[in-house]
């Protein structure tokens, strides 16, 4: 029996990553947890920034990008 193929990343995941990339977030990692039994979320996306100011800019950019969805 073939496993059902999972759809490509969702528009929301793409918006989050795009928001991070717009302000040059570093080390962006997307974990797809849809296949993990008991996971509390489907996707986990993390990144880093060089300063508090950059991390705040990343948060604002992600919020702006996701509100447009």
Image (tube, rainbow, N blue to C red):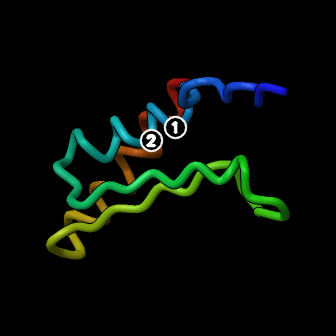
Quarter the N terminus occupies: top right
Q: At which x and y percent is residue 17?
A: 38, 41
Q: At which x and y percent is residue 4?
A: 76, 26
Horizontal side, residue 16 vs residue 41: left or right: left
Q: Which residue is depicted at the point 47% across and 45% down?
A: 63
Determine which residue is flagged by label 2.
Answer: 16
Q: At which x and y percent is residue 58?
A: 31, 55
From the viewer's perspective, is residue 20 above or below residue 59?
Answer: above
Q: In front here: 41 or 56?
A: 41
Horizontal side, residue 51 vs residue 61: left or right: left
| Label pair 1/2, CB-CB below 8 angstroms | yes
Count neighbours of disc 2 (C-alpha within 10 A) and say few if under 14, some if 14 to 19, many if 20 or more: many
Mark 2 element type: helix
Q: Which residue is depicted at the point 78% across and 25% down?
A: 2
> What is the quadrant of residue 18 in the picture?
top left
Horizontal side, residue 66 vs residue 38: left or right: left
Q: Spatial distance from mark 1 to mark 2, Cα to Cα?
A: 5 Å
List the single residue furthest toward the front.
1
From the viewer's perspective, is residue 52 above or below residue 5?
Answer: below
Determine which residue is flagged by label 1.
Answer: 13
Q: Which residue is depicted at the point 43% across and 34% down?
A: 65
Mark 1 element type: helix
């Amino acid at each position: 029996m073939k496993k059902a193929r999972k759809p490509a990343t969702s528009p929301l995941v793409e918006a989050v990553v795009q928001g991070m990339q717009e302000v040059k977030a570093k080390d962006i990692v997307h974990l797809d947890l849809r296949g993990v039994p008991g996971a509390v979320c489907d996707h986990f996306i993390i990144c880093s920034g060089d300063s508090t100011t950059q991390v705040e800019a990343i948060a604002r950019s992600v919020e702006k990008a996701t509100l447009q969805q």
